[in-house]
């Protein structure tokens, strides 16, 4: 007599780094989670050294936060305003230096630090404005960084719930994400 035993089981696959994701917090924690996922899953992480981050609160989609990561191809212009303590500097004020990779972003609530300047020098991405000879336009401008970027859509109430979209398109449909 042959007996067949079948067990019902619901399996979910998790990646080892997912245990390190931060559940509660704000933009800093969302950025940390995006960098954690990116450093463990994105091919670009191994191909490039410097990455720019942009964060957006999606007011039209209640409860979502968007973190964009793309490789950086441009120098950062160091001007007279690029001094520690200045919140009006045009240099990114926040960064994470992880595994000899640099991730930087602008944070209006955080001043430029001497540590940030030293890290930008370390990665050789500062360009001096040559005593005011090179200037930035008064209004914002857009630089095309790369063909693709990685976009992370996070639930603000649980930052471990997110969807990652790799795209080369400017506008994309919001992925389905259950934040309840």
Image (spheres, rainbow, N blue to C red):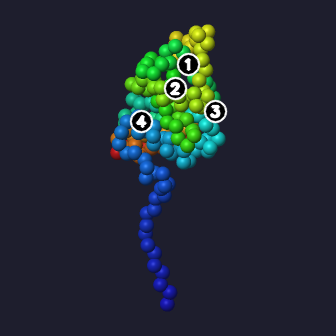
The residue where tag 2 is placed is 117
For the residue carrying disc 2, how many other residues have a C-alpha within 10 Å: few (<14), some (14-19), or many (20+)?
Answer: some
The residues tagged by marks 2 and 1 sit, at their Cα atoms, a distance apart of 9 Å
Looking at the rendered image, the disc whose residue lies closer to the viewer, 4 or 1, is 1
Q: Which of 89 and 16 is in front in this view?
A: 89
The residue where tag 4 is placed is 28
The answer to whether mark 4 and mark 1 are in CB contact below 8 A is no
Determine the secondary structure under disc 4: helix
- Tell me residue 55's x, y (percent): 46, 31
Q: Is residue 118 at least partly visible in the picture?
A: yes
118 relative to 40, above or below? above
- Tell me residue 73's x, y (percent): 63, 29
- 77 lies left or right of 95: right
21 relative to 119, above or below? below
For the residue carrying disc 3, how many other residues have a C-alpha within 10 Å: few (<14), some (14-19), or many (20+)?
Answer: few
Residue 84: name its quadrant.
top left
The residue where tag 1 is placed is 78
Q: Nearer the viewer, residue 46 or 176?
A: 46
Determine the secondary structure under disc 3: loop
Determine the secondary structure under disc 1: strand
Looking at the rendered image, the disc whose residue lies closer to the viewer, 3 or 1, is 1
Residue found at x 49% / y 44%:
36
Q: Nearer the viewer, residue 147 or 2?
A: 147
The residue where tag 3 is placed is 147
The residues tagged by marks 3 and 2 sit, at their Cα atoms, a distance apart of 28 Å
Query: Which of the marked residues, 2 or 4, is nearer the chain's N terminus?
Result: 4
The residues tagged by marks 3 and 4 sit, at their Cα atoms, a distance apart of 26 Å
Residue found at x 48% / y 41%:
34
């Amino acid at each position: 007599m042959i007996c067949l035993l079948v067990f019902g089981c619901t399996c979910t696959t998790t990646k080892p780094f997912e245990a390190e994701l931060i559940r509660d917090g704000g933009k800093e924690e969302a950025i940390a989670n995006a960098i954690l996922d990116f450093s463990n899953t994105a091919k670009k992480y191994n191909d490039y050294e410097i990455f720019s981050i942009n964060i957006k609160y999606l007011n039209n989609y209640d409860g979502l936060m968007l973190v964009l990561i793309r490789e950086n191809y441009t120098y950062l212009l160091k001007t007279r305003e690029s001094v520690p303590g200045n919140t009006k500097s045009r240099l990114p004020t926040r960064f994470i230096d992880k595994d000899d990779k640099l991730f930087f972003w602008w944070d209006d609530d955080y001043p430029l630090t001497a540590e940030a300047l030293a890290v930008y020098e370390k990665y050789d991405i500062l360009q001096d404005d040559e005593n005011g000879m090179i200037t930035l336009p008064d209004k914002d401008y857009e630089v095309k960084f790369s063909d693709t970027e990685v976009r992370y859509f996070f639930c603000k109430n649980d930052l471990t719930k997110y969807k990652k979209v790799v795209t080369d398109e400017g506008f994309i449909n919001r992925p389905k994400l259950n934040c309840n």
